[in-house]
Image (cartoon, rainbow, N blue to C red):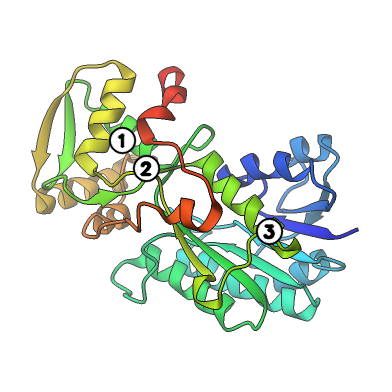
Amino acid sequence: MAIILVSGGTGFVGSHLVPKLTKSEEKIKCLVRSFTKAKALREQGIELALGDVTDPQSLREAMQGVDTVIHLVAIIRESKKATFNGVNAQGTKNMVEAARASSVKRFIHMSALGASPNPRYRYTYSKWQGEEAVRSSNLDYIIFRPSVIFGQGFGYSFIDSMIRSLTMFPFIAPVPGSGKARFQPIWVEDVISCLIRALESEKGGLGMEESEKTCEIGGPEHLSYEEMLDTVIHVLGIRRVKVHIPVPLMRLAVIVMERVVSDPPVTSVELAQLDLDNTTDLDSVERHFGFKPLALNQGLGYIKSS
């Protein structure tokens, strides 16, 4: 029986993916940092491997007998214990090296749309470094680059940040700069469907060309930041006056919030990313995986009770 190792099985994408994988014929193993925090996975009958992407030795032990790795572990906000370089870049490199040493056949890596060799954008730069480790590994791989993912079960997603800003300022809706930076939000369940179909391609279902091994995916529409904010406000059924805040002023406000608020609605790194559009071809999912993804306004019902 083939064994699939999932890193990040308790995270946002992982918590949606693992239940679907348990319905397959393969044996599922999840890399976890704590057995206690992964109790829900154990209750599903999933084998747990204790390890951390920053600990190469633990990864070599977890990889024993594994055929396919689905690497989802990443951070979008840094802390004293977890940095972009340590987790997103070096952590991915550690996973790749352990996979090679254990003769893993296939490596599926979750990156991010906008991954770039430009070190000014620290998050997307760390994702690029992780990708480079995968591309140079000689493993059979697929790299997924999703645009912003929305869906239930995550406290730090793009949509969650918008909701927190609306909560922090009860009468206004702050809009950074022009609000025209564009995104292509994709529903988490559609991301899962892409991952599942990529797994099935090993059995002859999909068959990507080498040039398509780095696969950009997004929803069915390009939306500006302001349009996404309008959608969130409409779904929540609230009233807000939108106020455009100049980016330099916003930058100063964010620096202050980062110092006095433990969980600010936006960080300096996230604000910097608004310099860049986060889009790909509108038919990317349909072209690669044969289905049309859900639009943002169709998949935000879960925020009504958040």
Q: In screen coordinates, is 75 left or right of 108?
A: left
Q: What element carries label 3?
A: loop
Q: Look at 76% across and 40% down and name the residue there.
A: 41
Q: How far apart are marks 3 and 1 (CA)?
A: 38 Å
Check the picture and name the quadrant holding the C terminus. top left
- Confirm or deny contact between disc 3 and disc 1 (CB under 8 A): no
**Which is more N-terminal, label 1 or label 3?**
1
Q: Is residue 37 visible?
A: no
Q: Which mark is residue 153?
A: none
Where is residue 117 drawn, in percent x and y? 36, 77
Type of residue at label 3?
Gly
Q: How far apart are marks 1 and 2 (CA)?
A: 7 Å
- Confirm or deny contact between disc 1 and disc 2 (CB under 8 A): yes
- Residue 46, image quadrant: top right
Q: Is residue 137 visible?
A: yes
Of the residues tagged 3 and 1, which is closer to the observer? Answer: 3
Q: Look at 48% across and 35% down and name the residue there.
A: 151
- In this figure, which residue is indicated by the disc labeled 3? 205
Q: How crowded is mark 1: few (under 14 residues within 10 Å), some or many (20 or more)?
A: many
- In this figure, which residue is indicated by the disc labeled 1? 162
- In this figure, which residue is indicated by the disc labeled 2? 158
Type of residue at label 2?
Phe
Of the residues tagged 2 and 3, which is closer to the observer? Answer: 3
